[in-house]
Image (spheres, rainbow, N blue to C red):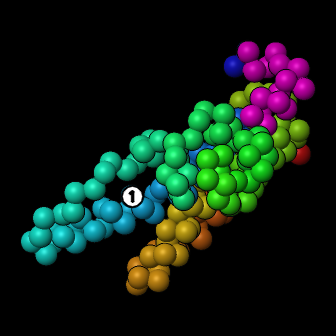
Amino acid sequence: MTALNGLEPEQWLVLSALLGLCIGSLLNVVAHRLPVMMQRAWDADLAEAQGREPETLPRFNLFLPASHCPACKTKLKAWQNIPVLSYLLLRGKCGHCSSHISLRYPFVELLCGGLFVTVALLNPPGLVALALMGSALGWLAIQPFRRVCTTGQRCGWRGNWLFDTLDYLPTVQIGHWQRRYGIW
């Protein structure tokens, strides 16, 4: 942790912003792919329960296939995956087919980056700030699962109470750090 403690305030803010943007990009991947992965698993389970052979589909997880345009399926180049910057450079369109890219992607990245910068502004570099970023990230990370639960509710699955309860965890965790370390 001594390396973090030695950072200048400007370096700490830049590092926090970059980390937040990258984490926001990962949350976009999870929000997009997890429902598809779960649907495929449910379909395979249903086929097995009905005594049918599950449909053979191409591999699909958080890593495969590589990022691509949903419209034309062209694989994205590395520079087209840079959080927020690539959206601005491409003017919100696919670099190959010019189809529209949702504003949700840079919004989530900026939200997460802004959240991390806010924590960095309020806390010096160190363990407490990283714990608070982790707590904030924990709250943000469950948001894609809300989408899955909402989808599940339309299908008759009732599980949203769990995520409503988990919404309070960051508040409790931040309160713990405030009492323990006297921050704010």
Q: Image height check: is 142 above or below 148? A: above
| Residue 177 percent location from the top left of the image | 74, 44
Q: What residue type is labelled 1?
A: Met
Q: Which residue lies furthest to the left in this view?
A: 51
Near-viewer residue (70 or 120): 70
Q: Residue furthest front?
A: 97
Report which residue position mark 1 lands on: 37
Query: Residue at position x 32%, y 48% from top?
Result: 59
Locate residue 63 relative to residue 147 in the image: left or right: left
Q: Please give the range of residues in magenta.
A: 3-18
| Residue 75 percent location from the top left of the image | 51, 42
| Residue 74 percent location from the top left of the image | 52, 46
Q: Quadrant of residue 127?
A: top right
Query: Residue at position x 30%, y 62% from top?
Result: 41
Query: Residue at position x 28%, y 68% from top?
Result: 43
For disc 1, the neighbor class at 10 Å (few under 14, some 14 to 19, many from 20) is some
Image quarter (top left, top right, bottom left or bottom right) of the C terminus: top right
Q: Can residue 155 be seen?
A: yes
Q: Image height check: is 55 above or below 12? A: below
Secondary structure predominantly adopted by residues drawn in magenta: helix
Query: Residue at position x 46%, y 57% from top?
Result: 34
Near-viewer residue (144 or 101): 101
| Residue 64 percent location from the top left of the image | 41, 43
Q: Image height check: is 46 above or below 69? A: below
